[in-house]
Amino acid sequence: MPYPRERPRRLRSTPALRRLVRETVLEPQHLVLPMFVREGATEPRPVSSMPGVVQHTTESLRKAAVEAVEAGVGGLMLFAVPEHKDADGSGGYAPDGALNVAIRDVVHEVGDATVVMADLCLDEFTDHGHCGVLTPDGAVDNDATLQAYQRMAVAQAEAGAHVVGPSGMMDGQVGAVRDALDEAGHTGVSILAYAVKYASAFYGPFRDAVESSLTGDRRTYQQDPANAVEALREVRLDVDEGADMVMVKPALSYLDIVTRVRELVDVPVAAYQVSGEYAMIEAAAANGWIDRDRAVEESLLSIRRAGADTILTYWAVDVARRL
Ligand code: PBG
């Protein structure tokens, strides 16, 4: 009987061999922790659809930011839940708006020890829940929204954000934000563009976390999950407009997009493992149906293997501590 000449199993036979030939690594520096702060909160509030995630108070946010730095995460991405919303989302660009205060607090606490990023979008601040301002007939007004993003970007930079993350999927948002930052003298503030953001059901738990006011959907500005070529166009536009990094979101259902984007551009590529991806694994694990820690690590490794340099994940601190 002929013996197999090639035996891939040889290199799997001991932990040391497997370690030697491991192609993909996951390190704390690759992980960015999204965090929520709730204006006026006196106690951290658990987000029921995201076990282990809370809406922070001002105090608990600072403390958690320090803990994340100690765990070695690559960065923090801040979101805020304001006490008051209005049609224009003015809380997004008010210097004393909830997110801008949170940026100031966190930067004051951690300085340059990690990268402080802020979500740049109006949806948390509008009473209708859309990512931009509306025309009289209720459509999202692209160009009027760009002006609001410009003000918001400058407010975030002035609060000390190292990176701003425009996530509203308005056309021209990266260029508009870059111009506004530069004109205000913030030439050193980077842009992490949510370049490819799909209209996804996997954002469901996030909308609990930020107490979203949205009733409809975001399909007139976020991408159709069926499209891949369009994603490449979005990325090309954002890089041309000055994006320093580009992001694909969600991650697990879009690993093909992560790979294609990684091949297309010469800037760092991030992927956002979103709230629904987190909730699915936590829920299955809570039922005893999967091994939580292994499933979490496998999901993160697969996103890295697909080509992401950076991963936004609610497990960032948890995993960083384990590594
Ligand atoms: C928009 C924004 C959303 C998420 C991040 N930024 C929500 C949306 O587009 O509906 C979702 C993140 C997640 O689901 O974890 N500000």
Image (cartoon, helix red, strand yellow):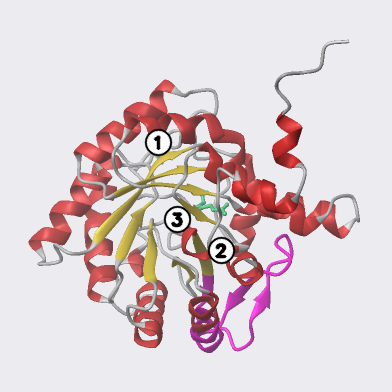
Quadrant that contains the C terminus = bottom right
Percent position (x, y) of residue 26? 56, 55
283 in relation to 227, above or below: below
Q: Which residue is located at x 40 percent, y 72 percent? A: 99
Magenta span contains residue 293? no
Residue underneath mark 2:
210
Pick whichever, 262 or 169, lies toward us.
262
Say left or right for 45 vs 194.
right
**Mark 2 surroundings: few (<14), some (14-19) or many (≥20) residues within 10 A:** many
Report if the beta carbon of the residue with label 2 is closer than 8 angstroms to ligand 1. Answer: yes
Q: Amino acid at mark 2?
A: Val
Q: Earlier in the sequence, mark 3 or mark 1?
A: 3
Q: Amino acid at mark 3?
A: Asp
Specify whether residue 250 is in view.
no
- The residue mark sitting in front, 3 or 1, is 1
Percent position (x, y) of residue 292? 79, 57
Report the Cα–Cα distance between label 3 and label 1: 28 Å
Say left or right for 317 vs 257.
right
Report if the beta carbon of the residue with label 3 is closer than 8 angstroms to ligand 1. Answer: yes
- For the residues labelled 2 and 3, say whether their Cβ atoms are less than 8 Å apart: yes
Residue underneath mark 3:
123
What kind of element bears circle 1?
helix
Pick whichever, 308 or 184, lies toward us.
308
The residues colored magenta run 36-65
Percent position (x, y) of residue 123? 45, 55
Pick whichever, 279 or 75, lies toward us.
75
Q: Amino acid at mark 1?
A: Arg
- The mark found on residue 262 in the picture is 1
Q: Earlier in the sequence, mark 1 or mark 2?
A: 2
Report the Cα–Cα distance between label 1 and label 2: 30 Å
What kind of element bears circle 2?
loop
Quadrant that contains the N terminus = top right
